Image (cartoon, grey):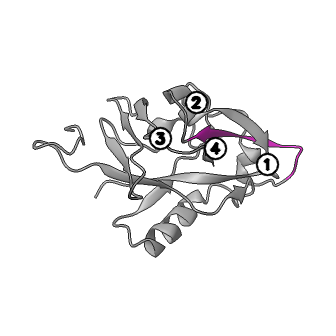
Amino acid sequence: MPPMGGGPSGPPPLLAFVTSTPLAGNLSGISGDSHCNTEATSLSLPGTYKALLLDSTLTDVNMVLQPDAVYANAEPGMPWSFTTDSLMHINSYNNGGASPTFFWTGATTGQVKDIDICSNWTYNTSGYSGAYGNLSASNVSDFISVGSQNCDQTAKLLCVQNPP
């Protein structure tokens, strides 16, 4: 598959955005995709989206992302972006001056499922925790997993476009 770099030989970048509403850890299981598609529709964004959210079934970011792709922020004026390699792992990240915005990932810095996934995204209690990333990170590791917080706390979702 050719790189999705938006150059003369490749298709334009895929879109990505962070949901406007923070959510607690009970996402009714891994239903982040429905949150993403509802918001994408309200923003008149093209295509369908999935949440970059890992659980006991989706155990690696390469199960969500496309290989050799560029993901660009769908929101004007916020030029953050990231790219993936042939193994579909994030290999570069440009925060574009984004302000600190935390989003649930359920991922470790190694981009695989963390033990902290709010019991498969079904609990909103302080007895469970979920891993999250940060849009203002200066490196890939902190972008995908900067820490973990109790599931009764809130974070947004990072939504990535499915290829057309």
- Residue type (three-letter) at the residue carrying disc 3: Gly
Q: Residue at x 50, y 44 (%)?
A: 98
The answer to whether 127 appears left or right of 110 in the picture is right
Residue extent of the magenta highlight: 125-134
CB contact under 8 Å: marks 2 and 4: no
Q: Quadrant of the C terminus?
A: bottom left
CA gap, disc 4 to disc 1?
Answer: 14 Å
* Residue identified by numbered label 3: 97
Q: Main secondary structure of the magenta part?
A: strand
CB-based contact (under 8 Å), mark 1 and mark 2: no
| Disc nearer the start of the sequence (1/2) | 2
Disc 3 element? loop
Marked residue nearer the N-terminal end (3 or 1): 3
Query: Residue 44: horizontal and vertical position, in percent?
Result: 39, 73
Q: CA distance from mark 4 to mark 3?
A: 29 Å
Earlier sequence position, callout 2 versus callout 4: 4
Q: From the top left corner, tell me how far across and down residue 65 is, in percent.
A: 42, 43
